[in-house]
Amino acid sequence: MGKYFGTDGFRGEANKNLTVDHAFKIGRYLGWYYGQDHKAKVVIGKDTRRSSYMFENALCAGLTASGADAYLLHVTSTPSVSYIARADDFDCGIMISASHNPFYDNGIKLLNGMGEKMEESVLDGIEEYLDSDTVLPYAERDAIGCTVDYAAGRNRYIGYLISLATRSYKGFRIGLDCANGSTWMMAKSVFDALGADTYVIANRPDGLNINVDCGSTHIEGLQKLVVDNHLDVGFAFDGDADRCLAVDEKGNVVNGDHILYVCAKYMQDRGTFGDSKVVTTIMSNMGLYKALDQLGIGYEKTAVGDKYVAENMRQNGHLIGGEQSGHIIFGRLANTGDGILTAIKVMEAITESKMTLGELAAPMVMYPQKLKNVVVTDKDETLACEEVKAAVKAVEEELGENGRVVLRKSGTEPLLRVMVEATSQELCEEKVDQIIDAMRQAGRLIKIK
């Protein structure tokens, strides 16, 4: 991670940590970088936050001042920017969003011409420019870039999603929670076109209500919608729609690990999985691994972040990967997590198998899990502390094959995350506190957040 760009872009509170000056300079750098030997083309999307509009304008000003043309998808999803960047031969794509964060935060996500997370070398160049007094050359006369309304690109992406469905959803009652974000119009359009009887909540964005008590991080609203209306299934997206969690016909949450299991088993049953493996992060639940073991499906683990999942999938040709939070990547169909695509693939498993989502997910049983965030004197020194390492080892030995410990640095905040999985919630609590107590006794703990 750099000073500004983390695993998921440059994120911070709008006009505090992330300002329009930052956005302008990012646009200036990208327009110059990609325009050194041709007229650069950059596609831009945004979510529904009030600040997304000012960041869009600042990025466009920077890009066009450096001679690049800026194509605007307007309010759309991160995966749509990824798809259009790849399909329509753009130099890069920009998504303005802070994903599941509150409305007052925002972020700038950069994607390369293949719709993948931007290369570190480009991000390093931007960071150096942001902190320098370098003045990049301005475009002049007819070399100045233009801004292009490109809503047609968003519509083409919607058409692509619809084309991926294998069957009509006629007769299915489907709930959608759009998080007052990027999918507020898009998701219903897709599911209506496929014949579903759709019930939609959190589809009235006002610039300030994105992710407020809704979406994949507040799924209780969707659970109530499904149960009260006797729906067959529900899908909840986050602010920029690169995540999807589901709710089964009984109102039970079906998280990203369940979805990985359901889709991998579906592909295996139909003989399309081959020798592929499921790619997860180290935070996926033990229950997923045990369920995959029973199927004879292999898996690989990466560092936390869909960026690392995607890299592993590309390098090894794996077909599916993702995170418990609902970032699911389908390797042959997309280069980033895609919430609506994930919902379509889950519906494929439901319609083709003629089973409910609850029945499909039932064989994967989640292990209880407890995670606490702790602020420490120094993250690296705490991880290297002998007393802390001894406590982790002791817990791991006590749990054996029926549990595990994950102790890691946060990628976005100045703290450590302590996570334990075990056979009961009480045991998880006890063992997390045991590790935190070791930090306290070693003089490393500042507070539990």
Image (spheres, rainbow, N blue to C red):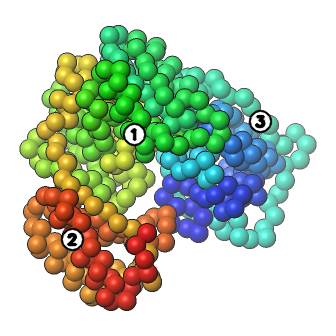
State the image coordinates of residue 427 (x, y, percent, origin top left). Answer: 17, 65
Residue 388 relative to residue 137: left or right = left
Q: Nearer the viewer, residue 394 or 316?
A: 394
Secondary structure type for disc 2? helix
Residue 399 relative to residue 84: left or right = left
Q: Nearer the viewer, residue 203 or 152?
A: 203
Q: Earlier in the sequence, mark 1 or mark 2?
A: 1
From the viewer's perspective, is the residue at label 3 or at label 1 nearer?
A: 1
Residue drawn at 34 percent across, 49 percent down:
323
Q: CA distance from mark 1 to mark 2?
A: 28 Å
State the image coordinates of residue 400 (x, y, percent, origin top left). Answer: 9, 67
Q: Nearer the viewer, residue 412 or 117?
A: 412
Q: Which residue is mark 3?
A: 147
Q: Residues within 10 Å of mark 2 (few under 14, many from 20)?
A: many
Secondary structure type for disc 1? loop
The image quadrant of residue 399 is: bottom left
Q: Earlier in the sequence, mark 3 or mark 1?
A: 3
Residue 430 relative to residue 223: left or right = left
Q: Which of the labelled discs sits on residue 70, or is there none? A: none
State the image coordinates of residue 119 (x, y, percent, origin top left). Answer: 52, 56
The amino acid type of the residue labelled 3 equals Thr
Secondary structure type for disc 3? strand
Residue drawn at 30 percent across, 38 percent down:
253
The image quadrant of residue 199 is: top left
Q: Earlier in the sequence, mark 3 or mark 2?
A: 3
Q: Which residue is mark 2?
A: 431
Q: Which residue is mark 1?
A: 219
Residue drawn at 55 percent across, 55 percent down:
9
The amino acid type of the residue labelled 2 equals Lys
Q: Residues within 10 Å of mark 1 (few under 14, many from 20)?
A: many
